[in-house]
Amino acid sequence: AYHVAGGFWFSHPDAGECTDGHYVGDGSGCTWRHVQTTSVINASCMYDRIDVAIEQHDPDCFSQCPPNNRSTDCYQKCYYESSLSMTVPELTAPWPAAITREGGGCPQVNLSGVSAPAHHKPTTEWE
């Protein structure tokens, strides 16, 4: 599905995963494989960074809303209007800044010892 901020969202069905040494195009019928996990962060950190970027885009509007309450009608209206007036680079800037391992990124989450279902594998690169 296309997103206004640019790019696409793909959901990869479990049945299409390349396993046991198979790769896309080898005749096995698999359609994707996990290449590498480059960053694992909490979604809440990412969401906070996106919210801050949108709030900073139109501080006058947000200053009229009750403080520390993102669920008010006022906040939601400002959020909607502010995000619609932002450029693609402004909307997407929080993403790479959050996942960077350089200073200023969200804290990395250690998944060693964590067992997740196959369809919940944390990844950022696919082929």
Image (spheres, rainbow, N blue to C red):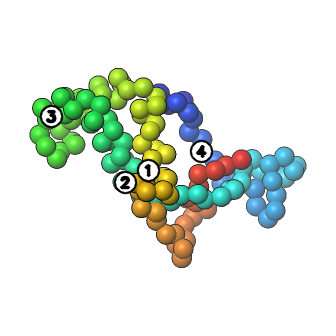
| Circle number at residue 8 | none
Residue ID for mark 1: 98
Residue 57 horizontal/vertical position (percent): 30, 31
Q: Nearer the viewer, mark 4 or mark 3?
A: 3
C-alpha span from label 3 to label 1: 25 Å
Circle 4: element type: loop
Furthest-front residue in view?
Answer: 103
Say if mark 4 contacts mark 3, CB within 8 Å: no
Say if mark 2 contacts mark 1, CB within 8 Å: yes
Circle 2: element type: helix
Three-letter amino acid code of the residue under disc 3: Ser
Q: Look at the picture and state if 116 lies above or below 6.
A: below
Residues 92 and 122: in front is: 92
Q: How would you rate the neighbour count of disc 1 (Cα within 10 Å): few for under 14, some for 14-19, many for 20 or more?
A: many
Circle 1: element type: helix
Residue ID for mark 2: 45
Mark 3 and mark 1 lie on one chain; the one further toward the N terminus is 3
C-alpha span from label 1 to label 4: 22 Å
Residue ID for mark 4: 11
> Is residue 73 visible from the viewing direction of this image?
no
Furthest-bottom residue in view?
Answer: 113
Residue 48 left/right relative to 13 = left
Q: Quadrant of the N terminus?
A: top right
Three-letter amino acid code of the residue under disc 2: Cys
Say if mark 3 contacts mark 1, CB within 8 Å: no
Residue 78 horizontal/vertical position (percent): 24, 30
